[in-house]
Image (tube, helix red, strand yellow):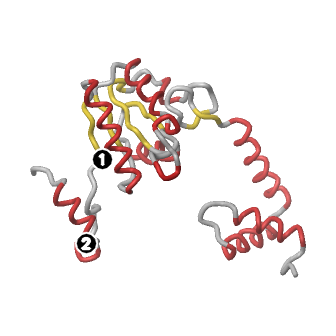
Amino acid sequence: MALYIKSVENLINEFKKLPGIGPKSAKRIVFFLLKLPRKDILKLSQSMVEMKDKVKFCSQCYGLSEEDVCYICRDGSRDRKKICIVEEASDVAIIEKTGEYRGLYHVLGGLLSPIENIGPDEIRVPKLLEQVKANEVEEVIVALNPTVEGESTAGYLKKILIPLGIKVTRLASGIPVGGDLEYADEVTIGKAISERREL
């Protein structure tokens, strides 16, 4: 027996499909939406449809764009000799927000995973090599999460890029600014020690 009327139950079930949204969160969202005026619901639904209709992947870096080539790849002031490799298009915004990086990007769209039959072709490695050669790239910055898949992907990229004469760097990892050693795990502290730099 359904707990709620069909239309409410259907929407709860749709929200449960979203990442990070469990049954309780889905229910809270639906009951919040029920309180909104109809015009706000229409605005929300129109925004979602508009996003789906307009947003695509950049033909050069695979970041998000409403045009064939994204604003970053079109920006002539960017350093075309540097490419930052990220897993997902959402990672580009995180790095851009820092204001510290002015090069180009390449979005892999996943990580190597032999268990799931995800190889270099499935994560746009051939397109990365095209981009590297077209821009005569000198440095590739690997900005992947330090997971097992992220580490193996980083290792693979290093193996294929260094023979091309490209400097391959990795984001530093370790204790965050404002962090406390007491609350850091052993792996994080170990990374911080092994990747220490001179002051």
Image coordinates for residue 171, horizontal then vertical, percent: 30, 47
Q: Nearer the viewer, residue 50 or 112?
A: 112
Instruction: Of the two numbered discs 2 and 1 on the same chain, state the one appearing first in sequence.
Output: 1
Q: Amino acid at mark 2?
A: Asp
Q: Is residue 1 above or below residue 156?
A: below
Q: Nearer the viewer, residue 8 or 124?
A: 124
Image coordinates for residue 16, horizontal then vertical, percent: 70, 66
Give me the C-alpha separation between circle 2 and circle 1: 20 Å
Which residue corresponds to the image point at 56% horizontal and 30% vertical from the top-left?
58
What is the quadrant of residue 101 in the picture?
top left
Which residue corresponds to the image point at 52% horizontal and 46% vertical from the top-left?
117
Q: Which residue ends up furthest to the left in the rendered image? A: 198
Q: Secondary structure at mark 2?
A: loop
Which residue carries the number 2 mark?
Answer: 180
Screen quadrant of the N terminus: bottom right
* Of the two numbered discs 2 and 1 in the rendering, the one whose residue sits closer to the viewer: 1
Image coordinates for residue 45, horizontal then vertical, percent: 78, 52
What is the quadrant of residue 56 in the picture?
top right
Q: Is residue 117 above or below residue 29?
A: above
Q: Nearer the viewer, residue 197 or 39?
A: 197
Using residue 24 as the reference point, say whether residue 173 is left or right of it: left
Which residue carries the number 1 mark?
Answer: 171
Which residue corresponds to the image point at 77% horizontal and 68% vertical from the top-left?
12
Using residue 189 as the reference point, say whether residue 38 is left or right of it: right
Q: Secondary structure at mark 1?
A: loop
* Number of other residues with Cα within 10 Å of mark 1, as a class: few under 14, some 14 to 19, many 20 or more: few
Answer yes or no: do the residues labelled 2 and 1 have beta carbons within 8 Å? no
* Number of other residues with Cα within 10 Å of mark 2, as a class: few under 14, some 14 to 19, many 20 or more: few
Q: Amino acid at mark 1?
A: Leu
Image coordinates for residue 38, horizontal then vertical, percent: 85, 59
